[in-house]
Image (cartoon, helix red, strand yellow):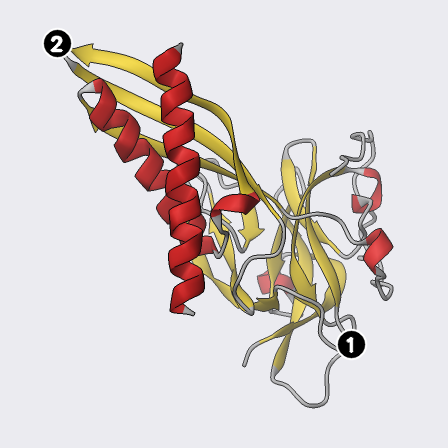
Amino acid sequence: MHRTSRLRTSLLSLAAALAAAMTAAAPASAAPASAAPASAAPAAAPASAANVGPVVVHLTGMGSGPQNIAAAAAQDHLARQAAELGFNGSQCRVTEGPVFQHVTGIYYNAMIKATCNGDPAVSTRTLNRLIGPNGEHISTVWNVPPGYRVEGSLGQLYTSPREGTVPLYHCVVRRDNFLSGDVNCEGQTYVSRLGWFYPGQPADVGSAPLMRCMVGKQREFFESNATNCEGQASGGQLGWIFTG
């Protein structure tokens, strides 16, 4: 018990040190509904600070070796992931661990989980479309879930509001991931705010359409820049995404 407390204290100290180094160098969820979101994507309305949903990013740090070394490696892995996403130590809190799995002798695997909130210290992030082993798509600016691979980039999202932009959210319906400009996820389950995009085509920046599309008999959702949804069914245009 004392060892776990010391390891958590060590993680917080490491995260604080990481935050200092970065500085020197430079939600409530909607209850799932039985119906899927409307096939025609709703037009996003201008957002005020009062109705902007939170950023919620879950990270997992992994490490191996003797117990103390495995824990330190898991802490380091977690801190590196947070830094790569633009979060400092004060924005992330440990939610589980360190949890140890005994391998053999004095050798262990260690796992630490954390949740990061707040705006990352970067101006834009790439919105990637991912695909899992079962063909399920996820479009996100955050970490790649285990078993998924990046299919390609859909463009860039601002991490803070710019003139003419509105928030874009990651939502889930029946375990199917989709994006929405509605903070209530059209009556489905809220996951996280991804960033800010344009509801209408901007005149002064490069942009591409961001479409909601559906594929297969189950009408599985995915996002595309192609207005014909790459030959699949269209669920409507979400808006316009910054391309540089």
Residue 38, which numbered label? none
Label 1, label 2: how far apart the Cα atoms are: 59 Å
Q: Residues within 10 Å of mark 2 (few under 14, many from 20)?
A: few
Residue at position x 34%, y 15% in the image: 3
Q: Viewer-proximal residue, 129 or 24?
A: 24
Of circles 1 and 2, the one toward us is 2
Q: What quarter of the picture does the N terminus occupy?
A: top left
Q: Percent from the top left, x then y, of residue 195?
A: 65, 60
Rendered position, 187 above or below 226 = above
Which residue is most to the bottom?
A: 204
The answer to whether residue 80 shows anywhere in this view is yes
Residue marked by disc 2: 105
Residue at position x 49%, y 51% in the image: 88
Q: Viewer-proximal residue, 222 or 93?
A: 93
Which residue is most to the left?
A: 105
Q: Percent from the top left, x then y, of residue 155?
A: 55, 69
| Sequence-wise first label, 1 or 2 | 2
Kind of residue indicated by mark 2: Gly
Q: Percent from the top left, x then y, of residue 103?
A: 20, 13
Helix, strand or loop for disc 2 = loop
Helix, strand or loop for disc 1 = loop
Rendered position, 216 above or below 224 = above
The answer to whether residue 150 shows anywhere in this view is no
Q: Residues within 10 Å of mark 1 (few under 14, many from 20)?
A: few
Q: Percent from the top left, x then y, of residue 83?
A: 42, 53
Tell whether label 2 touches label 1 (CB within 8 Å). Answer: no
Q: Viewer-proximal residue, 33 or 124?
A: 124
Residue marked by disc 1: 164
Kind of residue indicated by mark 1: Gly
Residue at position x 56%, y 77% in the image: 243
Residue at position x 69%, y 57% in the image: 212
